[in-house]
Amino acid sequence: MNISSRKSTFASAGIALIVVMISVAVLSVLAVGLALMMKTEIRLAQNADSEEQIYWLGRSGVELARWVLAQEASIPNEPYDSLNQIWAGGPGGMDETNSPLNGVSLQDYQVGEGTVSLRIIDLERKVNINSADPVLLRQAFTVMGVDANDVSTLVDSIGDWIDPDDLPRTAGAESDYYQSLSPAYLAKNGPLDDSTELLYIKGVTPEMYWGPAAGQHTGTGVHQKLGFGNAPGQEPQYAFGMVDVFTPFSSGRININTADANVLQMIPGVDENTAQDIIKARSGPDGVDGTVDDTPFRSPGELAKVDQQLAQQAGRFCDVRSHTFEVHVTAHYGNAQREFIAIIVRNSNKDVRVVGFRWN
């Protein structure tokens, strides 16, 4: 036998085996890659489907809110909006339990294979910054604890930011002032579309805008003061923030059934004690808002039960109905979750419109 021929055969067989092994390894890698790619494609498809489902769940939640608000306005014996009603997360009154709202839950409401949870906030519990007159603004800043020397600057600057002309008020500012800043910008000369626009206005600081929660938003932390007063250049600690009491959307009148004590004190003639008396009168025997024994005001004139003189001017600043609502919808589908926010305007039980919709 030719030994060299046998060696050549063995060498060829070894090379062939190596080629086969390499081919198997390559095919295995390709198979694994294909499997991973298919898995990724399936996951992307599932995510796309979840996003689509989540979006429509969010829209469904807004429609549910519209329906609830329309039904609430249809209840004949409740010509008001209050914190004990179902739309506000309360238990509902006797007339609500005899309406289509009976048994409706705003939490984990089943829609197809997903759920939605609603939080509805009426914006008449705040003051409309776009229509607030100087009297209300001065009252607001005084209650906040703004230094008296800064109040005129804030009131005039807010007025200049909103009005359509370029003529600055005595302590205000127009585009000439804002163009001198870095970065420079122009005065809006129009209504605010979002309350955060206040941060662009002369005199408004983050601490003033956010109030006690400023540290959470500015990252500066909360520094407790030692002693009384403020050191030179030290920002005062405000009782609340502008964001807590102002909104760019509302009918312009304050709902005395839903406003908190800070907002109630913006009504001329209402001090801290009067505000607490208003809350006590509407919250019923247990003294807690949003419970079954609440006794909401049925008209602004009923403020006479608290203060006769206040009732005489209540119609100018107050209401017992809310017309503008901010709806927060939390949609769940499988493991996916997203929050949607809508602005709803209710003109009547048959005219409930969505005027804004966005998601986080």
Image: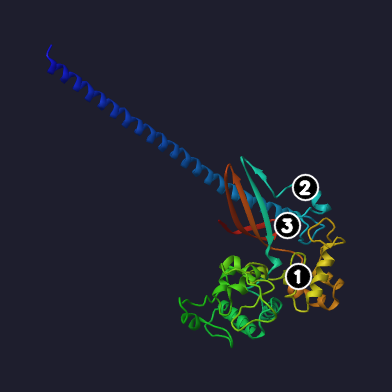
Find the distance from the CA under tag 3 to the CA under tag 2. Answer: 14 Å
Note whether 135 is above or below 263 in the view shown: below
Dividing the image into 4 quarters, which one contains the C terminus?
A: bottom right
Label at residue 350: none
Q: Earlier in the sequence, mark 3 or mark 1?
A: 3
- The residue singled out by tag 3 in the image is 88
Residue shown at 57%/81% (left/top)? 160
Vertical placement of residue 204 versus 333, above or below: below
Give the CA separation, mark 1 to mark 2: 31 Å
Q: Give the label on residue 102, or none.
A: 2
Callout 1 crowding tier (Cα within 10 Å): few <14, some 14–19, many ≥20: some
Q: Residue furthest bottom?
A: 170
- CB-based contact (under 8 Å), mark 3 and mark 2: no
Q: Position of residue 156 (x, y in %)?
A: 60, 83
Residue ID at (59%, 82%): 233
Q: Residue at x 56, y 79 (%)?
A: 202
Give the mark toward the camera: 3 or 2.
Answer: 3
Dot 2: element: loop
Q: Which residue is mark 1?
A: 261
